Amino acid sequence: MGRPASTKKCQVCGWPGLVRNGTTSAGRQRWRCSSLGASTTKTRRDQIELSQFTQFISWVTGHDTQSSIDGTQTGRSFRKNIAWCWRIPIPAPPLTGEVHEQVFIDGTYLAYGWCLLVARSNTGLVVAWQWCHSENSAAYGKLLARIPPPLAVTTDGAGGALKAIKEHWPETTVQRCLLHVHRNNTRDLTQNPKTMAGKALLGLSRALLKVTSKTEAAKWATLLAAFHTEYSAYLKERTYARDNPLEAASRGKKPTGWWYTHERDRRVYHRLNRLYKAGDLFAYLTTAKQALERTTNPVESVNHQVKRVIKHHPGLSEDHLTCGIERVLHSYTHNPDTPKQILKAWHAAGEPTRRLIPKKPRTTTRLGPKQHDTGLSSEEGLYTRKGWAGRPLNNP
């Protein structure tokens, strides 16, 4: 029994039943009309779109250059093929309703004045992100409103984040990132403090990073209390403006004013004491049955991958940059859609265009004198004439 005839029709004569006739140099199937002898090929647009879109996602989330992909020196062919891919919307993180044990939130500043807030769970999944211009409470509120309140949240201590947590997640335990706490302490004390109190505080700050159990946390708290007992009078020492008028003038103090002499050491102690009393230092040991993460490193790693988009693809426009970053974030979400699923949903929705960032009109003001203009210049003798100059006199 022979092979059944094809249902394709000849594009020239309309004869049904085309037969296979090898392939083209590009690997496409060639069809031959048994009546007319004409050959034709059929292009599968869906397969071409899938191939181009898959290549686009691989490029924008990777480190390959455009020229290395299409084999040219400029990459112009690749840019032409993927130009339509920028219009496809990025799927939003799925709302699973899962209550996570721990969520890490952080913000990173990017090009074009943008700030990106990212929330990542302890399972390694990105659960939400929010574009903004600064790490304020309103932006963090938009981020937290999409996530069910977790058992604990870890943050670097940004004021906007703490305010939003208090408003949206009042029952959630806050764990301050210990690396950020130590970094703030080092900024005040330096790596080589000169005073004995400064050296003791630096030792306490370093020991904070090595606490792994409740017993060690209690010992650390005992050392902090012992420091206050020994250096309480030292931290209260004052410098009066009348004794150092030059520094008082630089500080904007009145002649009768004063300030704390060791304000940097004082700031570090009160920072550690305040966070300890609030329970933000060792919440990772007391919140869950097993120890939680004590830093924001899980979300910082996502921020690093976001920054790689700028590093490997310099020169992206504002809209293309945000698109590439959201593609990276989507790859970290729960069960991310495949390129085939994204294209299928895009076509089913009527091929909507991704929401673009509106461009603000820019007015350029040129500095210096005008070169070509319609105004009159007195230097060239071109100005409005007044009086009788140049008019003929009518003698009686």
Image (cartoon, rainbow, N blue to C red):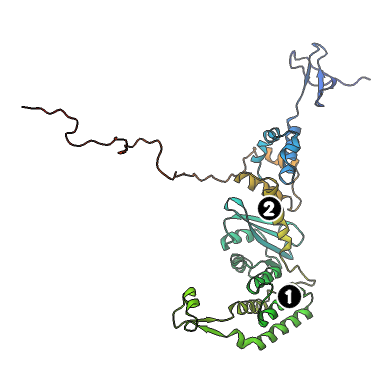
Q: Is residue 242 left or right of residue 109?
A: left
Label 2: element kind: helix
The picture quadrant where one finds residue 20 is top right
Is any part of residue 173 visible from this angle?
no
Q: Which mark is residue 307?
A: 2
Is any part of residue 374 visible from this angle?
yes
Q: Type of residue at label 1? A: Leu
Q: Type of residue at label 2? A: Lys
- Quadrant for the N terminus, please: top right
Badge 1 crowding class, 10 Å Cα cut-off, few under 14, some 14 to 19, many 20 or more, is many
- Quadrant for the C terminus, please: top left
Sequence-earlier tag: 1 or 2: 1
Query: Can you say whether 395 is above or below 223 in the image?
Result: above
User: Where does the image place residue 275, in percent across and percent down from the top left?
Assistant: 65, 76
Callouts 1 and 2 close, C-beta under 8 Å: no
Name the residue rendered at 72%, 38% in the picture: 66
Query: Can you say whether 362 is above or below 5 in the image?
Result: below
| Residue located farthest toward the left when viewing the structure as drawn | 396
The picture quadrant where one finds residue 358 is top right
User: For this rendering, which residue is in front, 205 or 48?
Assistant: 205
| Residue located farthest toward the top when viewing the structure as drawn | 36
Residue assigned mark 1: 208
